[in-house]
Amino acid sequence: MIHTFTQNGYTLVLDVYSGAVHVVDEEAAELIRLYEHHGKDATLAEYLRAHPDADMAQMHAGLEQIEALKHLGKLYTKDSAVKEALTADKKPAQLKALCLNVAHSCNLTCSYCFASQGKYKGEQALMSYETGKQALDYLITHSGKRRNLEVDFFGGEPLLNWQTVKRLVAYGRSVEEQAGKRFRFTLTTNGMLLDDEVMAFCNKEMNNVVLSLDGRQEVHDRFRVDHLGRGSYERIVPRFQAFAASRSHRNYYIRGTYTRHNLDFLQDILHMADLGFTQLSMEPMVGDPQDPASLREEDLPILYEQYEQLAVRMLERYRQGQGFDFYHYLINLEAGPCLYKRLSGCGSGTEYLAVTPTGDLYPCHQFVGDPQHLLGTVWEGIRHPERQEAFRACTLSSRAECEDCWAKLYCAGGCAANAYHATGSIQGVYAFGCKLFKKRLESALMLQAALAQDRQQA
């Protein structure tokens, strides 16, 4: 299977099953498309029927190169490796990561928040040290031979429970050597309580920190307001700038959300880059279709243009020595996730679990509060193995809609939570999200291929 497209003057061919990406001209792209379904002679005949004045020598040279790439396994690669991986006996997935919801409470009241302003449709609550400690012990016990474990302090706003966060990090560090483990701690914060003490601790202990900022002040302050309705932009931006600088602009992400109110979200990304931030992410709002802020099918053309222009502007800035990273465009053309991860996705419900302040276990933070997806507790373990098994079976092969999709090995069928909220099934497909994902992927491939060419020519 191949996928061909043209963007920003670059014509690219993706060989789906090998992952090889080729930058070609339109003539070569057409030959490659024809050759996929015809032999050499039939391809030549079809091409000449459409282009009777074509240069025969050039056509033969192009076809020889196509056959050489096919022989090298870089064009028309079969899906045999995928089928083998799908049918192979696999060891049960071992737990490797926890999302600790240390605070079901927040000092902002963002109306688009999937977590109901941090309360997850329940009561405000803070995780006790004892519950968090039990969660870390549960992770150690159920991680098998895995050495590297991940723990994300999440909310609500985790800094509302800062002393517990610090105690849990200290506990994790104290048992690492004896347990034969190594914790990678991360934190997600809105920045309202970010101060020098928090920054210093995070720089010592947190491998990554996600900072919530939606872009331009008028965009950010539309939703991200405190309980008095006051915008938070002016209070958090200087703190975020100081924090990013203190980490040498590494190991952090500025993470925004765009809605129907800022379909020109490219301007928000560029605004954040102009503030000096170099590690950026911007996610589409996923919410109730009746919400005026929710994205609609009719918005897709402008959203596609925004993603395409983002790649163009990033390429320009890289060439000017002012480059920045965008999370969804960080694709390694030489190597990527192993085939198993490409088929199984994020591991929610099996390798990754979310923990509430009371110790309840859910498949991920986006399922917290939904009794249908409660798995168990950190005290008693998994009480509903059949629910966990449903997530274990939620792989690329379980979604028939994905079978002929050229992007499937980059998304593994997409987010189970988004699929559930859109279709009522974790094995469904969030169609709107798929369309955005494929446009982001094309833009990412164009950007990375252009940068690779720049390096070769340097």
Image (tube, helix red, strand yellow):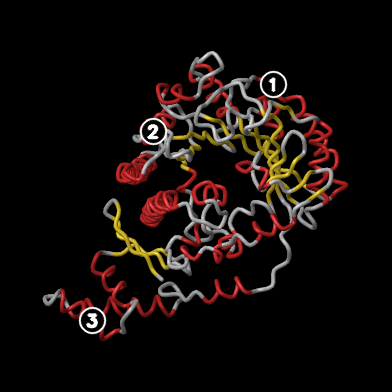
Residue 81, image quadrant: bottom right
List the residue tagged with mark 1. 197
- Label 1 and label 2: CA atoms lie apart by 30 Å
List the residue tagged with mark 2. 270
Q: Position of residue 222 (x, y in %)?
A: 43, 23
Secondary structure type for disc 1: helix
Q: Position of residue 44 (x, y in %)?
A: 23, 81
List the residue tagged with mark 3. 44
Q: Nearer the viewer, residue 298 or 445?
A: 298
- Specify few, some or many for label 1: CA neighbours under 10 Å numbering under 14, 14-19, or 20 or more: few
The amino acid type found where label 1 is placed reads Glu
Q: Answer yes or no: do the residues labelled 1 and 2 have beta carbons within 8 Å?
A: no
**Quadrant (top left, top right, bottom left, bottom right) of the N terminus:** bottom left
The amino acid type found where label 2 is placed reads Leu
Q: Is residue 458 visible?
A: no
Secondary structure type for disc 3: helix
The amino acid type found where label 3 is placed reads Leu
Q: Nearer the viewer, residue 153 or 178?
A: 153
Vertical relation: 110 (above or below) 339: above
Which of marks 2 and 1 precedes in the sequence? 1
- Specify few, some or many for label 3: CA neighbours under 10 Å numbering under 14, 14-19, or 20 or more: some
Q: Position of residue 83 (x, y in %)?
A: 56, 74
Which of marks 1 and 3 precedes in the sequence? 3
**Residue found 25% across the figure and 84% down from its top:** 42
Residue that sits furthest to the bottom in the current view: 41
Q: Position of residue 369 (x, y in %)?
A: 66, 38
Give the left or right position of residue 88, taking residue 220 as reference.
right
Q: Answer yes or no: do the residues labelled 3 and 1 have beta carbons within 8 Å?
A: no
Which of marks 3 and 2 precedes in the sequence? 3
- Label 2 and label 3: CA atoms lie apart by 46 Å
- Label 3 and label 1: CA atoms lie apart by 69 Å
